[in-house]
Image (cartoon, rainbow, N blue to C red):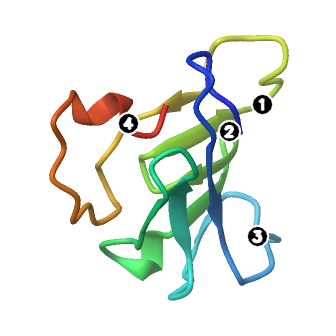
């Protein structure tokens, strides 16, 4: 994804995304920042990804992509929340990915 600040970030899961309305456990899941060349693993793999509700998918409570995301401003990124950040951040952490 590319943020409104032109930063590129995203996430990866190895498991099939098929159970709508449920969390997906994936020990191989991660979120990443291409600009900062870093990746982050989930604190609890049982909650790596959520499918459903008002969102197409959510990487923990970090990257949330809303339904109809091309038509609204409901998608958001809160970092770090449910993914481990071993990087010393000099700026506001919530803007590290975006």
Left/right of residue 88 with respect to residue 73 in the rendered view: left
* Chain-order first, disc 1 or disc 2: 2
Residue at label 4?
78
Residue at label 1?
67
Q: Residue 19 carries which label?
A: 3
Q: Name the mark nearer the viewer: 2 or 4.
A: 4
**66 above or below 37?**
above
Q: Which mark is residue 56?
A: none
Distance between the Cα atoms at labels 4 and 1?
A: 17 Å
Left/right of residue 95 with respect to residue 64 in the rendered view: left
* Chain-order first, disc 3 or disc 4: 3
User: Which x, y percent locates residue 59?
Assistant: 53, 56
Helix, strand or loop at mark 2: strand
The quarter in which the N terminus is drawn is: top right
Q: Name the mark nearer the viewer: 4 or 1.
A: 4
Report the residue at 28% width, 66% height from top. 84
Helix, strand or loop at mark 4: loop
Distance between the Cα atoms at labels 2 and 3?
A: 13 Å
* Residues at circles 1 and 2 in contact by the CB criterion of under 8 Å: yes
Q: Name the mark nearer the viewer: 1 or 3.
A: 1
Distance between the Cα atoms at labels 3 and 4?
A: 24 Å
* Residues at circles 1 and 3 in contact by the CB criterion of under 8 Å: no
* Residues at circles 2 and 3 in contact by the CB criterion of under 8 Å: no
């Amino acid at each position: 994804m590319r943020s409104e600040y032109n930063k590129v970030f995203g996430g990866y899961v190895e498991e099939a995304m098929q159970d709508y309305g449920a969390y997906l456990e994936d020990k191989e899941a991660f979120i990443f920042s291409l600009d900062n060349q870093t990746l982050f693993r989930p604190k609890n793999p049982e909650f790596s990804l959520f499918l459903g509700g008002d969102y197409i998918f959510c990487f923990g409570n970090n990257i949330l992509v809303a339904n109809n995301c091309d038509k609204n401003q409901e998608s958001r990124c809160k970092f770090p929340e449910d993914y481990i950040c071993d990087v010393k951040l000099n700026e506001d952490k919530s803007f590290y990915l975006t």
